[in-house]
């Protein structure tokens, strides 16, 4: 890692200023470009996170609207998780009386809990 430059304070035309060598100035400009690039990536990631959260909200609303007419909700999906904490232990295929929307709802709830 490069050493931290020690600014040289000067007075130029009666105003306080800092003098940098050409190398220090180039390092400063390179650092500004890197920070600008990182800032842009953070903005993109934040936008994607907002979009993903909105998608989850929309899915939850869709499932809630569908739930009333779903015969599979007589046997709701389990809320228990596999040992790794990622997926429900029993998929819908194992129990034909269960429905996909219950499994999706359980999966959404699982992922919401890990994020919050």
Image (cartoon, rainbow, N blue to C red):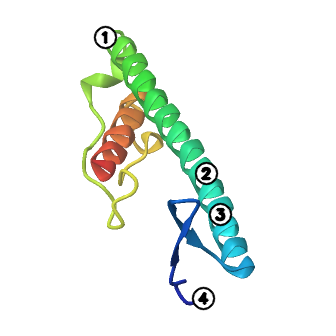
Q: Check if mark 3's residue and mark 2's residue have beta carbons within 8 Å.
A: no
Foreground disc of the pair 4, 1: 4
Instruction: Kindly indicate whether the residue at mark 2 contacts the one at mark 1 (C-beta within 8 angstroms).
Output: no
Residue that mark 3 sits on: 34
**Local crowd at mark 4 within 10 Å, few (<14), some, or many (≥20)?**
few
Residue at horizontal 50%, vertical 36%?
52
- The answer to whether 9 is drawn above or below residue 6 in the figure is above
Q: Name the residue under label 2.
A: 41
If you read the primary sequence from the N terminus, does the residue marked by circle 4 or circle 1 appear first?
A: 4
In percent of width and height, residue 69 lies at 36, 9
**Secondary structure category for the residue under label 4:** loop
Q: Distance between the residues labelled 4 and 3?
A: 15 Å
Residue drawn at the location 60% of the way across and 74% of the way down: 19
User: Any mark on residue 68, and which?
Assistant: 1
Q: Which of marks 3 and 2 is in front?
A: 3
Disc 1 from disc 2: Cα separation: 42 Å
User: What is the secondary structure assignment of the residue under circle 3?
Assistant: helix
Q: Which of marks 3 and 2 is nearer the N terminus?
A: 3
Crowding around mark 3 (Cα neighbors within 10 Å: few <14, some 14 to 19, many 20+) is few
How far is disc 1 from disc 3 in space, using C-alphas? 52 Å
**Residue 17, image x and y in percent?**
53, 65
Numbered disc in front, either 1 or 2 = 2
Q: How far apart are marks 4 and 2 (CA)?
A: 24 Å
- 2 on left or right of 102: right
Can I make out residue 100 in this image?
no
| Mark 4–mark 3 CB contact (< 8 Å) | no
Check disc 4 and report the residue beneath it.
2
Number of the front mark, 4 or 3: 4
The tag earlier along the polypeptide, 4 or 3, is 4
Q: Where is residue 74 in the image (x, y as percent from the top left)?
A: 25, 23
Give whichever of discs 1 and 2 has the lower sequence position: 2
Mark 2 neighbour class, 10 Å CA radius: few under 14, some 14 to 19, many 20 or more: few
């Amino acid at each position: 890692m490069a050493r931290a430059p020690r600014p040289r304070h000067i007075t130029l035309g009666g105003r306080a200023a800092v003098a940098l060598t050409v190398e220090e100035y180039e390092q400063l400009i390179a650092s500004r470009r890197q920070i600008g690039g990182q800032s842009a990536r953070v903005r993109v990631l934040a936008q994607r996170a907002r979009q993903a959260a909105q998608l989850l909200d929309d899915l939850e609303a869709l499932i809630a609207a569908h739930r009333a007419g779903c015969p599979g909700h007589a046997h709701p999906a389990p809320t228990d998780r596999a040992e790794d904490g990622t997926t429900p232990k029993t998929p819908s295929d194992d129990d034909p009386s269960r429905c996909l929307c219950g499994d999706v709802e359980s999966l959404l709830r699982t992922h919401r809990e890990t994020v919050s």
